[in-house]
Structures are given as structure tokens and as C-alpha cells.
Image (spheres, grey):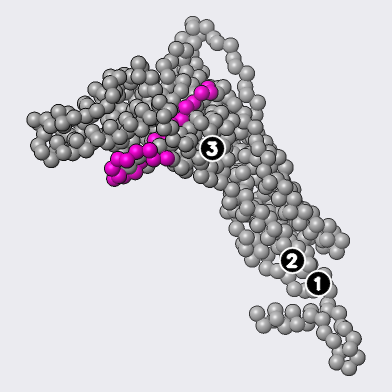
Amino acid sequence: MAPLLSRLVQLAPRFNDDSGVLHQPQSLNKSSFTLDSSGVAGFFGGDTAVSGMATVNLFKYRRWGGWYNTPGSYEIAKQYGQLANSRLWDGLFPGGTHDPSQLFGLDGKAGPDFLAARSGSSFTHTGHLAYLLTRKAGRMRGVRDDEGRTTTPASVTVVDLHHVPEERVEPPLRWSGSGLLAIVPIAASFTACVICALTWDWFCFASIALGIIASGSACFVLGSGKLTFKHHNPAKGAPPGDGILKGGGGVVVLRGQEGAVNSVTRGRYFLRYQPPRPSKSPTRTGTRRKTLGRGSLDKGLPDGMELPTLQQTDANATSASDVKPRLPPESQPRNVFIGFAAILLTLQFLIQLLLIPQGQLLGQILFVATLAVSWAYNTFLSSIDREDIQTTILVDDILKLEQDHIKKFEFGNWTAMSVFACLALQPDANDPLRKPRKLLDGLIPNDTEVWECWKAKIVQKLSSNAPWTFTSADWELKELDEEEQELLETLLKDAEVAYGVWSRWRAGRRSPTPATAVNA
């Protein structure tokens, strides 16, 4: 530290006490002081750069905004070089995943359980899109319209799906102010290059220029993927896909056609890097029998799906993961482009370590300044909630939901919430649920004698058009003792409260205000 301070004192301007003449310090370009290259390389981490790169496919023109000298080039190469998907690149960048949608955070989150009301296609786990919709419902502000008891508050979000998406949809990307902010690090990097060239500091010039080319190329190649939504079309004549997404603090009731509900429960996002392959003409039955095998059987399935394993062919399989989606072939980047971009990022990291110590002090300071500005911009990009953007695309562009298509109701206990959810699944009194007991067991798995009696009463009411009124004859049962009868009376009163909210909402006499989203 002492030699450094003495050197700074020598470089500072000073006056001659006798003549008053200002003595100029030694030029920065001629200084022998150099920055520690290892310290420069490790000062700014690459985590923010990796997180910022994950936004490259969510904003319009974002792929053109990466032409600046960014820190963490090796971390970016190690993270995204796996997408090259070949033995050579796997050896250079081992581990990770080859699925761009999971790497960019467009897939991979497990959704809640789905209980089907009419189609029978219940899943023990759903996918990323169901997670997004449930997340949006959890952040909405509902209205409580009952005066029942309060134990564990729960909510019911009713979503009316009026639009059935196409099998493949490429939603339009939205413009974001982050595109304009990219001008700041780009201008800083190019200005530093010009100054280094004017001062004949070609080592720092080459280091900054290489960073600009490597980062810009990687951003352009990775951002060439088109965000695409995909789901399978149900068979003709399929019953309505109404059902319940069972979350932790409440449920989401989905009402609509089978194709609309499938888009939430079994749809997915992926990135399309290549044009879709043309569909081949179907082969004759005789030819297929000669080449019968798992590969040929997979060709007969809808695009993006594969056959389940032998254990999954059981008729009782009810998990959405029983038939796992296969990565579409067009979602893989071209190996040569993504591989060369990763190699270029790695070379940037290595070459900058060698060249920066050879440069002049001014060039080294400019190099660190470009990293600081780029790091600040990457921090801003990493602070953007990508799941909010994905949810907006799902709601507005895929499902085309209007404000009045989503309503949220708050209840003071899980019992009233469960009854209201079942009532919401039969908007027409002349079309009751076929198996309401299955829904009740899924929402409330309790199987004590009191709950069994309560469920039997609720199933009876759901199967009739009569108003829900319970009397002492409904809970004063011989097989129950006094405490159990008191509990059953309380549970039946909760059901009456839920029926009152549902009847007012259906009749429109006291319809709650549509819920509004909070930070979504």
C-alpha cells in the first residue's frame, strides 16, 4: 500500500513555491503502474451476466443489444455452451441441460395437482404454465362475500377459458425500455475502444473489442430462438375439460373446452431455433408392422410427445408426467453457431487476462470502467421478473383472457372454499357433476365418520336443484355422538355459506368486483 500511495503522490500536480509554476505529472500513458489482471477478472462476477442473458428471448430486439464488453464471459460460456448439444461441446462444457426452455427459465417449474370434473384426465402434477396461472391467482386481490367462520383462509379463483389456442402459437414479443438502456453500456464500450486507439494502446483496444464481439455474437445467437407455445389438440367430441388446480392457499377453477384447459395443464413454452420439419406422409400399415418398435411407435404420437414406459401404460396412471413431453427437434440451436459463440466467450476471458497487463494505465482504467457499466446493466436485467413476463404472454396472447374472465373469492375456511369450487364447476343447475364425490375427496381427503356423513350430504345437494338448507335432522344422526353432531352441524353451516355466495354470484344480485392483480 505504501509504494502505491507514494506513486500517486508523484503523479499528482504540484506547484513550485518560488516561481508558482505548475509542474505537470507524468503521463498516465507512460506510467509503469499496471492493474492486477487476476483482480480485474475476478472483481465482477458472472452471475448477473448469466441471469441478464436469460432475458434475451423475452423482449423485442433484445438480441441486438449485447454489443458491449461484459464481465463473466466464461460463466456465460459454461452455462449456455451446453446448448450446442454435441460430443465436442459437451466435453468442453459438461453437465447441465440441453433444453433451452429450461435453461432460460421458460419451463421446469412443477404446477399443482389437477382434478378433472368431467373429462376424467386428472393429473397429480401439472407443468410450468399451470404454475404461472396459479401464481397469478395467488397474487390477485379477492373479495370476501360471506360472514362465515374463519379458521384457515382459502380462496377460489374462477377462470373462464373462452379461447382454444392453436396447437402452436408464436406470441409477439413486447418492447421494453431495457432495449434503450443497452445504449449506455454499448456507448461506454465503443468510446473506450476509440480512446484506446487514439492513445495507441492496442492491447486494451483489442481486449475491449474482443469483449464487444464475443458478447454481441452470443446474445445474437442465443436470442435467435423464437418463443413458441405448444399443446396437443384433444380428440373430437371430448367433454369439457373443467377442473380444479389445487394449490396451497386455495384452488383455481378452470372452466372451458378440453383444448383450452389442456393448454394450461399440458401446454409448454419452448424456443424454436430451426424451421419445423415438414410432416412425412403416413406409411402403410404393412410397412409399419415390419419396423414395429419403440422408435416407429413414437412417430405415430402427436409431435412433442413420446410413449410412456411399461410401468406408465397402466390405465390408472393419472399424472401429467406419465407421458413426458419430448423436446421438439427445432428447439435445438445450430451446433456450429452456438458452439463458436461459447468458444469466443472463453477466448475473451483468456485473452483479456493476457493482454490487459500489457496495456497502459489509462486503457486499463477504461477497461474496468466498461466492465462496471456493463455489470450495472446486467444487474438491471437480472432484476426483471421473467415469470411476470411469461404470465402476461400466457394470459394476454395465448389464453386471451379479459378482466371479467377471472374472479377471485375469499373464504374463511377450507370447507366453504371446497363447496364453492364444486358449485362453480356446475354453472348450469340442469347439468350437475357426474362424480362430485371424487372432487370432494381430492379437496378434503379426511375420511372420518363425520366427514363421510358431510360428504354424503354435499353430494346429495349437488345432485339436486333444491336450495341448500340444513336442519337438525341432517346432523342429529344416531351413529354420531354429541360432539360429532356439533362438528357436523358446523361443517354443514359452512356449506350453506358457500352456497349463498355462489347463488348471489350466479344471480348477479350481489356480484363481487372482479379481482385485480397485484404486481402481475
Q: Secondary structure at mark 3?
A: helix
| Residue 109: % across, % down | 47, 39
Residue 197 visible to the viewer: yes
**Can the viewer see residue 443 in this picture?**
no
Q: Which residue is mark 1?
A: 28
For residue 89, above or below residue 11:
above
Three-letter amino acid code of the residue under disc 2? Ile
> Can you identify the residue that label 2 sits on?
365
**Numbered range of the magenta stretch:** 143-164
The residue closer to the viewer here, 17 or 118, is 118
> Nearer the N terminus, badge 1 or badge 2?
1
- Residue located 41% across and 32% down the image: 510
**In the foreground, 454 or 130:** 454
Does residue 258 appear to the left or right of 432 in the view shown? Answer: right
The residue that disc 3 covers is 391
Helix or strand or loop: what does disc 1 sit on? helix
Of marks 1 and 3, which one's residue comes earlier in the chain? 1
Q: Is residue 105 covered in magenta?
A: no
| Number of numbered markers | 3
Please state the horizontal and vertical placement of residue 378, each as a whole percent of the image: 64, 52
Question: Which disc number belongs to residue 489?
Answer: none
Q: Identify the amino acid type marked 3.
A: Thr
- Choose the circle earlier in sequence order: 2 or 3: 2
User: Which residue is farthest front?
Assistant: 509
Q: Residue 161: within the magenta? A: yes
User: Picture quarter containing residue 499?
Assistant: top left
Q: Are marks 1 and 2 in contact (CB under 8 Å)?
A: yes
Find the distance from the CA under tag 2 to the CA under tag 3.
42 Å
Q: Position of residue 45 (x, y in %)?
A: 60, 58
